[in-house]
Image: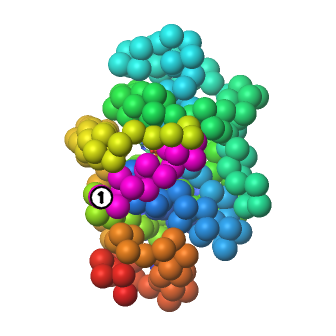
Amino acid sequence: MPKPSADNSKTAKASRRRLLITIDGPAGVGKSTVAKLLATRLHLFYLDTGATYRALAYEALRRGVDPRRETAVARVAGRMRLQLDWDPARGLRVLLNGRDVTRHIRTEAVTEAAAVIAQHPNVRAVLVRLQRRLASGPGVVAEGRDTGTVVFPHAAYKFFLTARHAVRARRRQMELRGVQGRSPTLTRIAGQLKARDALDRSRVVGPLVKPPKAIVVDTSRLPAERVVDRMLAALNKGSDPSRTMVTSDGV
Ligand code: C5P
């Protein structure tokens, strides 16, 4: 395993003691599915950082707080008690102030509000601290937008997933059907994805970017299991993470 660069920060020291793997990328590239499979195969904790933004968005909406109001949202963030209960057999359970909100945080309304609150630097600061606290155990597979750049910049392995826009829209549609029992048209979903991508990529703090030296995997034509196989191969090789693995042809 490559050693993280020398650094005296607390994060760097903690990173050296644990196996940290980050998976970043835009919505609909299959990050959650792949991260869960990888965490299960390696017996590591699965950290869904998007769930922290979603839980906060849900709580802000529930309290009638406008997601655009940074200070008010940051205050809600500071007060919420969030637990991410990961069990490979049962999946991820999201507990907010003791209440199970796993499904409630996946609706369209919460998704849109989460994209707005994720723009606020003060909110991100609170949530990044929370995410680091939540990442328990001997190792973590973290997924999100900034896990390899901001949350765990010293992670030993970093992956960046991509996929064609149409594929991402279809995956998101399936996900929404599972959660809400119905979903908007593909055209509408594709538009929503574009809008969220623009927000994710353009924000000043924690934007969606490929972390330096991350291994890139295009998942457009690869089933999740095969993506994980490739990741495991990279890990087993203790490979030089600066090598980019592009698999756009599904080979
Ligand atoms: O990944 P997911 O769709 O659950 O993320 C929900 C929202 O949280 C997204 O709009 C994304 O912008 C934001 N997010 C973020 N940084 C992360 C993870 C998610 O800004 N590390």
| Residue under the point 47% across and 59% down | 31
Point out residue 71 in the picture as x, y percentages from the top left corner.
42, 15
Mark 1, Cα crowd under 10 Å, few <14 / some 14-19 / many 20+, is some
Q: Is residue 231 above or below residue 4?
A: below
Quarter holding residue 115: top left
Point out residue 4 in the picture as x, y percentages from the top left corner.
46, 69
Q: Which residue is mark 1?
A: 166
Residue furthest top in the image? 64
| Residue under the point 63% across and 57% down | 46
Write the start and end of the magenta stretch as one range: 166-179
Point out residue 184 in the picture as x, y percentages from the top left corner.
39, 39
Name the quarter where the C terminus is drawn.
Answer: bottom left
Q: Is residue 228 above or below residue 54?
A: below
User: Of helix, strand and loop, which one carries label 1?
Assistant: helix
Magenta segment main secondary structure: helix
What amino acid type should be assigned to the residue bearing mark 1?
Ala
In reply to whether residue 180 is colored magenta, the answer given is no
Depth order, front residue of 241/99: 99
Q: Is residue 16 above or below residue 233?
A: above
Label 1, ligand 1: CB separation under 8 Å: no
| Residue under the point 55% across and 61% down | 33
